[in-house]
Image: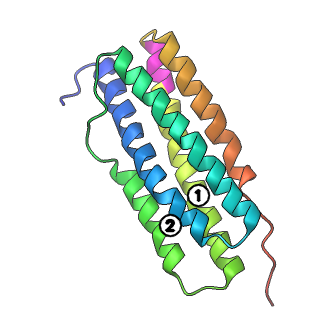
Amino acid sequence: MKLETLKDLYIHELKDLYSAEKQIIKALPKMVKAATNKQLAAGFEEHFEQTKEHVARLEKILASHNESTRGPKCEGMEGLIKEGEEMIEEDAEEEVRDAGLIAAAQRVEHYEMAGYGCARTYAELLEDRDGAQLLQTTLTEASGRPGAISIPVPRKL
């Protein structure tokens, strides 16, 4: 897809976010299983449910522009998820692994917030009020989540 207009860029960003969210949906069950802290596992489960809603919103916005969800794989998210998977495989104390999982999840959230912020701005500039509102809803959820999955990690001397 050649990017010639702001709308082209907007659609490209929506498809990139869609790819990112689908990758997150595949990764989160592994993070739930790897988390040893119950609060952390519950936070990942909540994130999983919210991510399904994010996907539905993106599908709705793309459909309103007569666009499919098909597009290139989001390589940025692929790299972040790979780092999270590497943390799962680390030979680490449970609390240390949980702290690493939190860091991986926060990186993912910040990546999402950047993408959703840009997409919302494009929607506003293109006067796609419904799209902007849906994107803002997701952005609000994502910006509130990083602290919600933080847990105290005991210091080992």
- In the displayed image of the protein, which residue is found farthest to the left? 2
**Residue on which disc 1 sits:** 105
The image quadrant that residue 67 belongs to is top left
Q: Position of residue 142 (x, y in %)?
A: 62, 40
Report the number of numbered marks.
2
Say the numbered circle drawn on residue 84.
2
Q: Position of residue 81 (x, y in %)?
A: 45, 61
Quarter of the figure that contains the C terminus: bottom right
- Contact between marks 2 and 1 (CB within 8 A): the answer is yes
Q: Residue visible at 33% across and 52% down?
A: 75
Magenta stretch bounds: 120-125
Which type of secondary structure does the marked residue at label 1 adopt? Answer: helix
Q: Position of residue 156 (x, y in %)?
A: 79, 86
Residue 58's place in the image compared with 21, above or below, is above
Q: Position of residue 16 (x, y in %)?
A: 36, 39
Q: Residue visible at 53% across and 74% down?
A: 88
Which type of secondary structure does the marked residue at label 2 adopt? Answer: helix
